[in-house]
Amino acid sequence: MKIEFQPLNGYYDKILLSQIDGSLDNGTGKVIQKNQVIIADTIHSDGLHAVRHANGRDWWIVVTKLFSNKYYIFLLTPDGFTTSEQSIGEATWSESGGEMVFSPDGTKLARFNAKDDLRIFDFDRCTGVLSNPVYIQIEDDADNQIFAGLSFSADGRYLYAAEVKRLFQFDMLAADIASSKTIVAERELSPDCPLGDGISFLELGPDGRIYGRHLNGQSCMHRMNHPERAGIACEMVQNFYKFDFAYNNLPHFPNFRLGPVDGSACDTLGLDNHPLAGWRYDKTGGLGVDFTSVSWYEPTEWLWDFDDPASGAANQSAERNPAHTFSAPGAYEVCLTVSNQYGSDTKCKTVWLNTVGSGSPQEAVPGVKVWPNPTMGAINWTGAENATIRVLNAQGQLVREIRGANGSADLGNLPQGFYVVQLHADDNILLAVRKIHLMRP
């Protein structure tokens, strides 16, 4: 499905449908029908967006009419699609470009451009009906901007509206959403991006961060590190990335990892939200780390194990997005388990915390390999000649140090358990860190 643009008239005037059967032509697919007109009407340029139906299989697709408060709502099923219309809320009056997005859980639909301002609706994933319209007028000198951006945080708590010169945050849990408006960033021009014109389109990434682009085609990209935090703690970093090529837009995706509305009238296919764990971490300096859950399919409980028993009760957390200060440098096998009424899932990854000299973070040198793991006592490595090997126990205590080692060492007289092996060069530069499991026959 796509929107057709008429360059001579300067507006979009059709919704077109194409169908591809991926099973045909030996699995490479074949176009069955192309650019079939399903709506002939003027369409607003803030686009088209989709959200999963409450049954966890079908899709709702929403398109807006130009100079109107009309919404075309399509339901896509394995049997085809149906079309409905709904007029609700304040009408738009401009052709200004912006974005329309669903919240990650699909319960909210928002649309924004700098001229027509912000509109927020409740959305029923079962019936496809919009309700409870909220109109938030933003009067300032950005009303002449022709593009704008919009994105929800991964937890749906905050909505971000970018109007080129400024970036606003709105608290979706506030009794009065309009009064929660907070400016979290103002345009910063960079000599690395001479054609840059502020903050335009936004997109929530699979890592839970929000990414943004300039108004013009650019080689720079913005990044918001913590959209789930209030105010400037969201950490909007402008011109974070500098590419070696220019780009004109950001890909815009629906939430493919949205399951059914369990227990609703439309939960008829026997599908359940079995949680899927995912997370990332950000070092905050020294031994401090922020953890962010990017788990899917509606978990209701989070349990973190930081593999740091020396930290005592702080070794575990039930927060969704906790912070942890580790007790010593090393490699920690951190695990997140997410759960709901249908089950649980665990995701484990290694967090490397290496400090040298003054304690500033430093990553291990690529190309240095340590093996085997687990081991019965002997360990080997390549890429580090005449190295110093240091072995730390689970409490971060140094239990073995061997200087001038060339490619191998024997840890056979240590008690079985987990250890952190560090390889250092002669000038004390950290070459490798590996968490190993020392076993006994």
Image (spheres, grey):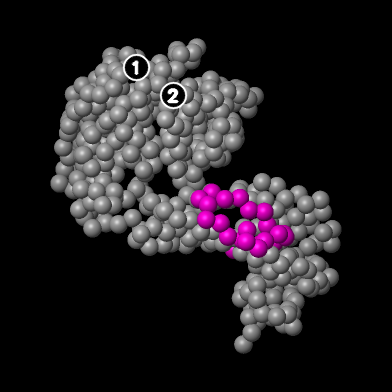
Q: Position of residue 167 (x, y in %)?
A: 52, 26
Q: In the rendered image, which quarter is residue 243 located in? A: top right
Label at residue 330:
none
Query: Residue under circle 1?
Result: 95
Q: Which residue is mark 2?
A: 178
Residue 247 or residue 81, whichever sits in front:
81
The kind of residue on which mark 1 rests is Glu
Q: From this view, report whether residue 414 is shown above or below residue 51.
A: below
Crowding near pointer 1: few (<14 within 10 Å), some, many (20+)? many
Given this view, does label 1 or label 2 mark the residue nearer the observer? 2
Give the residue displayed 45% in from the left and 52% down from the top: 295
Q: Which residue lies most toward the front here?
A: 175
Q: Residues within 10 Å of mark 2 (few under 14, many from 20)?
A: some
**Image-based side of 223 in relation to 131, left or right:** right
Residue at 57% x, 26% y: name it: 185
Find out whether residue 328 is within the magenta segment. yes
Near-viewer residue (151 or 188): 151
Spatial separation of the CA atoms under disc 1 and disc 2: 24 Å
Q: Pinpoint residue 342: horizontal percent, then vertical percent.
A: 34, 61
Residue 223 falls inside the magenta stretch: no
Q: The C terminus lies in which quarter of the figure?
A: bottom right
Residue at disc 2, secondary structure: helix
Q: Nearer the viewer, residue 52 or 196?
A: 52
Q: Is residue 144 left or right of residue 27?
A: right
Q: Which residues are magenta?
A: 311-334
Quadrant in which residue 230 is drawn:
top right
Identified at 63% across, 27% down, the residue is 192
Is residue 304 visible in the rendered image? The answer is: yes
